[in-house]
């Protein structure tokens, strides 16, 4: 049986946000927190299309990931800003997770989540859009967020603070 992790770090890029995720993992390990990275760019998930896909056509990979995510108490999502919003790979993943059950909010409802970005641009539009979407799904999104870029390097003290704040949060059971 695999060990249940305290934290999952979901990354929506194989570039700077993967590096950011690795920083979160490294800091988690230093703090003796059981964590792992879920790199969405390594998954082979089809583009969700409601005309083609429905609750009866959910990929097995999504079913397995949803089971796994249900067991993990806290999440960090690291994503780049795409065209002033959420990257398509993350939007697609959230869409699949939200349709794979009777209640589109069931996985997200009460879930403690921190958000972070390394963006070529400002990155604030991503963080705002992602926060709005996650709150709509019922998540508890940590007030502090991490915004980094080429002109604003990743701050490991902020990463540590975010992890420590996230650890104080518990999933709200409904």
Image (cartoon, rainbow, N blue to C red):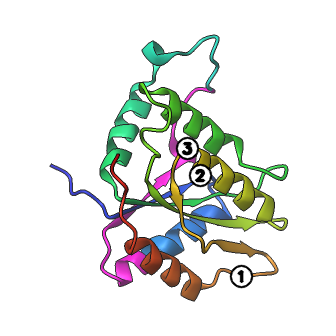
Measured from the top left, where is residue 160 in percent x and y?
49, 83
Q: Quadrant of the C terminus?
A: top left
Q: Nearer the viewer, residue 61 or 157?
A: 157
Question: Which residue in the structure is indicated by mark 1?
Answer: 153
Distance between the Cα atoms at labels 3 and 1? 30 Å
Residue 42 part of the magenta-drawn span: yes
Q: For the residues carrying marks 2 and 1, which lies nearer the camera in this image? A: 2
Q: Are marks 2 and 3 in contact (CB under 8 Å)?
A: yes
**Residue 170, magenta (yes or no):** no
Considering only order in the chain, which callout, 1 or 2, is on the residue closer to the N terminus?
Answer: 2
- Mark toward the start of the polypeptide (3 vs 1): 3
Do callouts 3 and 1 mark residues in contact (Cβ within 8 Å)?
no
Q: Secondary structure at mark 3?
A: loop
Residue at 37% across / 55% down in the picture? Answer: 172
Q: Is 139 on the left or on the right of 52, as rendered?
A: left
Judged by depth in the image, the label closer to the viewer, 3 or 1, is 3
Tell me the number on the disc at residue 135: 2
| Residue 66 position within the rendered picture, expressed as x and y whole percent measured from the top left | 39, 39
Judging by the rendered image, the residue that carries numbered circle 3 is 137
């Amino acid at each position: 049986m695999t060990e249940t992790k305290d934290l999952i770090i979901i990354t929506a890029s194989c570039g700077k946000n993967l590096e950011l995720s690795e920083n979160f993992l490294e800091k988690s390990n230093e703090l003796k927190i059981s964590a792992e990275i879920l790199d969405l760019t390594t998954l082979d998930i089809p583009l969700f299309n409601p005309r083609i896909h429905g609750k009866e056509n959910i990929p097995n990979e999504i079913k397995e990931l949803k089971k796994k995510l249900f067991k993990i108490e806290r999440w960090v999502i690291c994503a780049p800003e795409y065209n002033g919003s959420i990257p398509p790979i993350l939007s697609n993943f959230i869409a699949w997770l939200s349709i794979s059950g009777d209640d589109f909010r069931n996985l997200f409802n009460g879930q403690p989540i921190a958000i972070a970005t390394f963006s070529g641009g400002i990155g604030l539009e991503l963080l705002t859009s992602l926060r709005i979407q996650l709150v709509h799904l019922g998540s508890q999104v940590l007030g502090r967020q991490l915004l980094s870029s080429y002109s604003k390097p990743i701050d490991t003290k902020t990463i540590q603070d975010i992890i420590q704040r996230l650890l104080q949060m518990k999933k709200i059971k409904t």
